[in-house]
Image (spheres, helix red, strand yellow):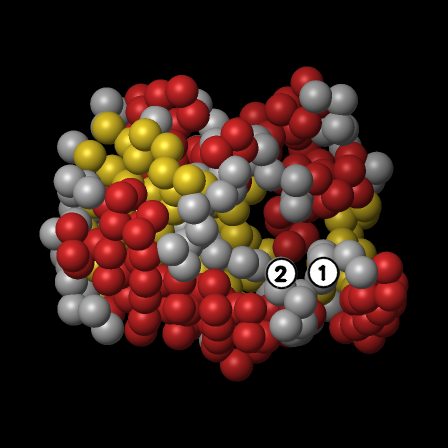
Amino acid sequence: MKAALTGGTGFVGAALIDLLLKEGWDVAALARDPARLPSADKLRVVKGPLEDETALAALTKDADVLFHLAGVTHARARQDYERVNVAGAEAAARAAKRAGAKLVHASSMSARRPEVSPYAKSKFDSEGAVARPGGEWVALRLPAIYGPRDMVTLPFFKLVKSGLALAPGTKPPARASILYVEDAAGALLAGVSAPHGAVYEVADERPEGWAWTEIGAALGEVFGRRTRPIAVPRRVIAAYHGAVRTVEGALGRGPSVREGQINEFFHPDWVARDNLLSEATAWRPTTPLKEGFAKTACWYQERGLL
């Protein structure tokens, strides 16, 4: 089987490349900077941006499947979400259709509630975008993902190691699905066999999801610590986010906090339950939360990050 892939330099994309190579796939990957691709010497690398149709055509030549993971999570302006996440998804779908390849599109659980943020809306709109060209496609709404190579969750690990576990101050407590990165890669691979023309939510091993306090307690056990849960009021996070965005804007830095992210953080329900991938395919998550946390903590510690 031949796979084409966008977003291979990202956290989940790198894990998917590892899995595809392990399973014996012939893999081609699109990248602006091929040096950032893991296992680049084992791939057919196509250099270019997502908006380059010639590069997309070269990427998908003879491909059976196109895994589309490229996207932006933190943009300076709303139109950047539209340009990359929506128009980019449609361009990938057109390329897949022309090549006769099935498209497996990585969406986000946030697409369930597009009103909460510009990012969430762009992921919701991307699901419609991949359907427009009319080829074979599936979209997978991935939940929160963690694991080795991820730098976004590192501050949370550091905080819990110190004995503190922050959680959004909501009533009832906010809950979410949370998935180890190798399981996320396995879900994307399972999307190849899922009935096409549908959006699937990807769950973890716990149908009811996890409260933030439970997530903090599980990670605390990995460190051998009893964590102190702290419910943080919305106004505190809002003030912090506002200060960060102001400073980054003044310094000309890219945003580390996206517009509307506070709405995502305080939304009470990000638990996967609608049209589950596990009901349409043989895929099941195999890494329990504590085991995944232990593997991730070990990766951070080996690199002197934790």
Q: What element carries label 2?
A: loop
Locate residue 224, reporting x and y percent. Answer: 73, 27
Q: Which of 226 and 236 is in front in this view?
A: 236
Q: In which quarter of the image is the C terminus?
A: top right
Q: What element carries label 1?
A: loop
- The correct choice, above or below, for 28 with respect to 56 in the image is above
Q: In this view, does 198 lie to the left or right of 73?
A: left
Q: In this view, does 300 lie to the left or right of 226?
A: left
Contact, mark 2 vs mark 1 (Cβ under 8 Å): yes
Q: In which quarter of the image is the N terminus?
A: top left
Task: Report the residue marked by disc 1.
Answer: 255
Q: Which mark is residue 74?
A: 2
Mark earlier in primary sequence (2, 1): 2
Say which residue appears at 29% left-offset and 32% top-offset: 27
Q: Nearer the viewer, residue 141 or 213?
A: 141
The residue under label 1 is which amino acid type? Pro
Q: How many marks?
A: 2
Q: In this view, does 217 lie to the left or right of 274?
A: right
Give the quarter of the image for residue 127.
bottom left
Say which residue appears at 52% left-offset and 46% top-offset: 145
Mark 1, other Cα within 10 Å: few <14 / some 14–19 / many ≥20: some
Q: Which of 239 and 126 is in front in this view?
A: 126
- The correct choice, above or below, for 125 with respect to 185 in the image is below
Locate residue 44, reporting x and y percent. Answer: 32, 30
Can you see residue 231? yes
Q: Nearer the viewer, residue 245 or 283?
A: 245
